[in-house]
Amino acid sequence: MFYESHREYLCSSDLPPEAEARIPARLRAVFDCGKAEFFAPLKQDFPQLFASLLESCGPLKVYEYILREERLSGGQVKQHLFCLGADAGPNQLRIDAMLAEPGSKLHRIKYAAKLACLPVEFAHFYTYMDGIGLLESGEIIGRELPLGFSHWRRLGLHLLDQGMQLPRTLADETDLEDMRLFIRTRSDHLVLTHVSEAGLYWAGPPELDVYHPIPDPAVALDPYMADVIKGHEPDLAEVLDL
C-alpha cells in the first residue's frame, strides 16, 4: 500500500489532521524523540539489530499515501494512509503503526492472542510498530523482517500459493492451519509461529510443510535481522545452522 508516498513529515507538528487522527499521541511523541528512542525496546534482546538500525537508517519519517477510489457515481474519494519509515541505504524501511494503545480493550481484543504466540522478546516488535519491512525500487523485497499481524497468513494458504499439494491427513491439515507466517525471505525460507505455543519454527524449500523449532530464537535471529537492515541477503538456513 505504501509502494510510493506523496508527502513526508519529519516532525509531528507538521502532520495533517488526518494523520493526527490516525496516529496515537504516544506514537507521535516517541517518533519526535528520534530513532534511538523509537527502537529502544529492541536494545536489550536484539542488540545487533538495534545497532544496525541506528547505523544504517536515516531519520524517522511519516509517509503519507493518498489512495484515490472511484465511486459508482463517477466521482473520486481520497483516502489518506500513513506509515512510519526511514531511508536505509539503497532501501527504505517501512514501519506499520500499532494503532491500538497497549493495555486498552481494543489492544487486548486485536493483539493479545497473537502476542501470546511469540517468545516474549519478540513482543518488542509490536510496541510502537506492527511489523517492519524493506522497500526497494517501489516494491517490497521479500519479508525478511517480522510481519505485521495482518500478514500472519496460515501456512496452508502459503503452500497453496506456491502450488504445493497439501498433506491429506486431517492431523497434518490441522497442524498446517495452526502455523502462521512470521518472517518470509526472498528465497522463501519461513519463520513460523504456532497459534497455541510461544515459540518460533523454521521451514525451507523444497519441503515447506516440514518445520523445525528454533532454539533461542532471539539470539539466533538478531544477527540475521541486523544483516538484512544493512542491505545484505543472509541465508536464513545457514544463520540458524539448519
Image (cartoon, rainbow, N blue to C red):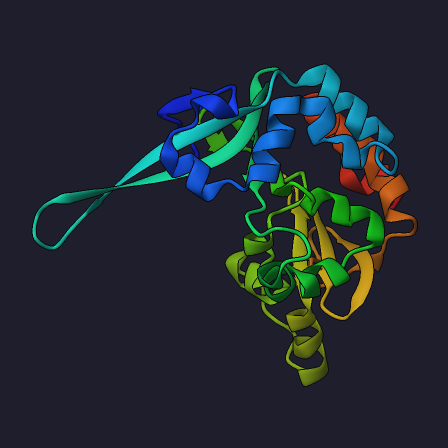
Horizontal relation, residue 77 to residue 229: left or right: left
x, y percentage for residue 101?
61, 51
x, y percentage for residue 217?
86, 47
Residue 48 visible at all: yes
- Given residues 123 and 88, the one toward you in this image is 123
- Given residues 5 and 234, the one toward you in this image is 5
- Given residues 40 and 232, the one toward you in this image is 40
Residue drawn at 78 percent across, 60 percent down: 211
x, y percentage for residue 174?
67, 78
x, y percentage for residue 39?
72, 31
Horizontal relation, residue 192 to residue 85: left or right: right
Residue 232 visible at all: no
Quarter-of-image position of residue 239:
top right
Horizontal relation, residue 106 to residue 237: left or right: left
Residue drawn at 83 percent across, 47 percent down: 121
Residue drawn at 64 percent across, 80 percent down: 168
In the picture, the quarter occupied by the N terminus is top left
Quarter-of-image position of residue 221:
top right
Q: Residue furthest left?
A: 73
Above or below, comparing residue 184 to residue 43 in the picture:
below
